[in-house]
Image (tube, rainbow, N blue to C red):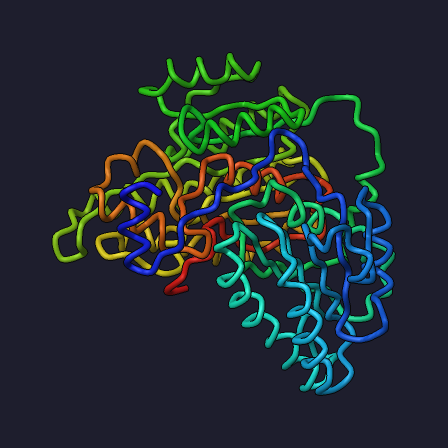
């Protein structure tokens, strides 16, 4: 154990487990235990699992060597108060055999008027249950996430809409995503796009792509088969060109805060047959307490982090520059959720992203476009390396996995939300933070 780990062990922080991350494949577990809060299994869940290349085990006694790599809990069939007891007993029996880096997924009904108050209470109870369980198993490098689905959905898309999130949360791609709640909308009008063959390569635009998280996102999307157009400002032109050359992508020098940036991107889209994915990653910090903050710190941060996103999206959508079935992913931040002293401007802009994504999603769905946000927590970058030692180490340790995330963790989540197979997910904000121990 290193001296740093010994010090933080004395402070009550668990020694971090090395996380099993993806090496370019989904890395799905070989055996998945499926349990339920009663004897009836959800038809849509069964149909979705049947289309995923995993071995489903419905009896704990059949788990090889009693080593549970992944656990799926069907909690969609609430009966009465006994459902709580079944949840407690079944999950408790499984936990003692949980392997390192295990994946736990709860599937429950989305609270709605179709359910009784008792059923809605159960759905909300599972939010607290899943987040608390995630903090307990995080010391093993394991994750817990909750997926909410429409109750008794007769839509044929229901099972199809579950495939992508189940695969993501089961895989090594979600190594730093835990304690999250994702709501599925299976009423999407554009699932048929998944079966339509496309002769051309999908095109993704990533702003702020020259380095750091933006470069990691661009690299991941290129590996997934996209033609990536990296966007960055003039001072980053040389680095952007180098990054894109390594990905066989294209460069586009642009200041996203320019009020004509959207028009320029729309013109670029016409040369590529439209865009399939827009990733709004460009952003800045200009930290100062509000009492001492210069006006240009405030205006620059809001202009780049929030206003540019809304202006560019409006320009692209009004010119049909985003193809049917396309996606938009916006980078928010945990500081936009929990706040941070000295960052009223930054937190304001990133919270604004969350509100914008949620409110415009229905409008974009009419054009068969999804929009979601990713909110990173402590991610290991050049910027965090410059932090004072104790602040940096506390940032790393203050989550259920007791370590910082990597740029690839953000990139994997962006790719998941942006892909066409995630058509049932829109208006959502997914945190990539390892699940903060204290706060939001």
Query: Residue 136, how many percent across, how many down?
Result: 50, 63
- Residue 386 appears in which quarter of the rendering? top left
Vertical arrangement, residue 238 with respect to residue 256, above or below? above
Going by the image, does 22 lie left or right of 345?
right
Q: Residue at x 77, y 55 (%)?
A: 63
Residue 191: in sight, yes or no? yes
Going by the image, does 216 lie left or right of 59?
left
Query: Residue 43, how many percent across, how many down?
Result: 87, 63
Query: Residue 268, how many percent across, how many down?
Result: 56, 23
The number of numbered badges drawn on the structure is 0
Front one among 41 and 345: 41
Q: Residue at x 55, y 17 (%)?
A: 247
Vertical arrangement, residue 208 with respect to residue 103, above or below? above
Query: Residue 309, how many percent across, how many down?
Result: 46, 42
Going by the image, does 135 lie left or right of 43?
left
Q: Quadrant of the C terminus?
A: bottom left
- Residue 159 appears in which quarter of the rendering? bottom right
Residue 363: in sight, yes or no? no
- Residue 146 appears in which quarter of the rendering? bottom right
Vertical arrangement, residue 168 with respect to residue 201, above or below? below
Furthest residue in direction left, as rendered: 292
Furthest residue in direction front, as rendered: 65
Q: Residue at x 69, y 58 (%)?
A: 184
Front one among 129 and 114: 129
Q: Quadrant of the N terminus?
A: top left
């Amino acid at each position: 154990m290193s001296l740093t780990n010994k010090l933080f062990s004395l402070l009550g922080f668990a020694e971090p487990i090395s996380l099993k991350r993806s090496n370019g494949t989904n890395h799905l577990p070989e055996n998945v235990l499926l349990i339920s809060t009663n004897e009836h299994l959800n038809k849509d869940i069964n149909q979705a699992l049947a289309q995923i290349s995993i071995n489903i085990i419905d009896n704990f006694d059949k788990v090889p060597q009693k080593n549970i790599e992944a656990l799926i809990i069907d909690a969609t069939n609430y009966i009465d108060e006994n459902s709580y007891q079944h949840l407690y007993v079944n999950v408790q029996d499984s936990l003692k055999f949980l392997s390192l880096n295990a994946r736990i997924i709860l599937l429950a009904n989305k609270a709605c008027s179709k359910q009784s108050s008792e059923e809605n209470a159960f759905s909300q109870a599972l939010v607290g249950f899943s987040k608390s369980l995630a903090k307990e198993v995080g010391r093993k490098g394991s994750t817990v996430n909750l997926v909410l689905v429409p109750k008794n959905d007769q839509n044929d898309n229901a099972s199809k809409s579950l495939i992508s999130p189940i695969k993501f949360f089961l895989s090594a791609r979600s190594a730093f995503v835990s304690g999250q709640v994702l709501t599925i909308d299976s009423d999407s009008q554009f699932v048929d796009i998944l079966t339509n063959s496309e002769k051309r390569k999908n095109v993704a635009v990533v702003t702020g792509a020259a380095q750091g998280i933006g470069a990691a996102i661009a690299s991941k999307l290129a590996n997934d088969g996209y033609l990536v157009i990296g966007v960055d400002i003039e001072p980053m032109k040389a680095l952007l060109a180098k990054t894109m050359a390594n990905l066989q992508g294209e460069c586009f020098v642009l200041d996203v805060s320019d009020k004509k940036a959207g028009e320029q991107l729309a013109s670029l889209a016409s040369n590529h047959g439209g865009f399939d994915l827009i990733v709004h990653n460009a952003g800045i910090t200009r930290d100062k307490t509000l009492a001492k903050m210069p006006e240009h710190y405030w205006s620059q941060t809001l202009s780049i982090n929030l206003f540019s996103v809304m202006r560019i999206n409006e320009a692209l959508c009004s010119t049909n520059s985003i193809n049917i079935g396309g996606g938009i992913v916006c980078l928010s931040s945990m500081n936009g959720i929990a706040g941070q002293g000295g960052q009223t401007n930054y937190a304001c802009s990133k919270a604004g992203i969350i509100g914008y994504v949620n409110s415009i999603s229905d409008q974009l769905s009419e054009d068969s476009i999804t929009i979601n946000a990713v909110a990173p927590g402590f991610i290991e970058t050049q910027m965090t390396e410059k932090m004072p030692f104790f602040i940096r180490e506390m940032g790393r340790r203050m989550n259920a996995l007791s370590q910082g995330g990597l740029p690839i963790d953000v990139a994997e989540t962006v790719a998941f939300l942006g892909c066409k197979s995630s058509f049932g997910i829109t208006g959502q904000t997914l945190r990539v933070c390892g699940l903060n121990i204290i706060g939001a």
